[in-house]
Image (cartoon, helix red, strand yellow):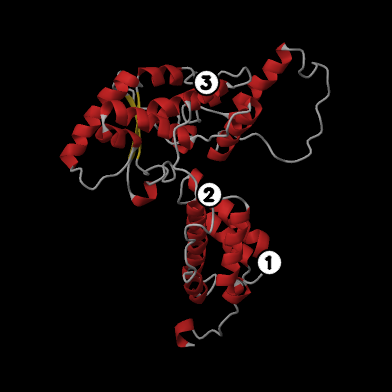
Amino acid sequence: MLSNGRRLPQASDEPAAEDNTVTIVCVAYIRHAAQRYSDSEIDTIRRAIRHVRKLYGSEPAEAFGPKRLRAVRQSMIEAGWSRSHINKQVSRVRQAFKWAASHELCSERVYRRLATVEALARGEAPDRDRVKPVPRHHIRRIRNRRNMTRPVRALIDLQLLTGARADELIRLRACDLDTSDRRCWTVTYDGSTDEKQHKTAHHGKARVLYFGPKAQRILRLFITTERPTDQPLFSPRESNAEAKARLATKGRGRRPNQKPNVPQTSRTIARQYTTASYRRQIHRLCEREGIPVWGPHRLRHNAATYLRRDFGLEVASIVLGHSSLVITQTYAEQNDRKARAVIAKVG
């Protein structure tokens, strides 16, 4: 009473932890992740959470235990996911409930019980081959399609030239570029303005992207006076406008006097790509070409293979942004100079 200012305790407006459903926990964790992790990681977390909510979303969070987690894991197996990916996704589900316990959305007992679920052993789910670079002729067939839009083609080419992750390029803006070195432009993501700007920003690590002459020629096509410098260079709205213009030239577009269709939903075309929307564009083109489906992340393997083969592991690791405990600060500066020289030559 005295510690409460001689006032009677008031009932909290927030529901008790035991009243929260699995959906409440999952949605809260997604909101937390959106403030901390990169877009690609959030997309991966959502795909894991989707299985949880589909099976047990309406049940109390306190009832989510090892048997239910194993059932979620079985649904991932039936979805055709690989063993290593399933183990990582199950770990993400556990992390969601660990975070929820720390924020009193469920009891700590829930997380402790989930931690007892062992990882899948070899043979309990299909194992995939190691991720390999995309065959060059498959890339050519996709990027040379007539209905390939400029933004998507530019993103593919830039990934091959720089080894950057998809989420590092889709949010690229003209104001992010340091053009003081004409031979090699750079972009430094250190988390000071947006900690989601690269995959490991929440660990306090900076990421430097390098753009050589070839990549600079691509970027100049999108750095125009009409585009504000704080807007993303690659926009799905521009891709949509290009597609409509292409149909109009073939006489298949909308007539000038045709009334607009009534929108069926409130969805609109986004201002910038997400890793998911960029990946879907490539997947659809692969399906239309009748070739094995590949995603943007494999283009990073193409760049890594080329850099390592021709310039060594040391240069490849710094260009790709990989960490190494054996590199001292002085040696890192030497690596930066090497990376600039290499990218000025090949990128």
> From what the image shows, is residue 174 above or below residue 73?
above
In this view, the residue in front, 46 or 197, is 46
Q: Is 79 left, or right, of 331 in this rendering?
A: right
Q: Position of residue 328 (x, y in %)?
A: 18, 43
Q: Is residue 174 visible?
A: no
Q: Residues within 10 Å of mark 1 (few under 14, many from 20)?
A: few
Q: Which residue is mark 3?
A: 140
Q: Which mark is residue 44?
A: 2
In this view, the residue in front, 322 or 78, is 78
Give the foreground label among 3 and 2: 3
Q: Is 276 left, or right, of 216 in this rendering?
A: right
Picture quarter with the C terminus: top left
Helix, strand or loop for disc 3: helix
Q: Which mark is residue 255?
A: none
Q: Position of residue 222 (x, y in %)?
A: 49, 21
Q: Disc 3 residue type?
A: Arg
Q: CA distance from mark 3 to mark 1?
A: 47 Å
Q: Is residue 286 visible?
A: yes
Q: Which mark is residue 58?
A: 1
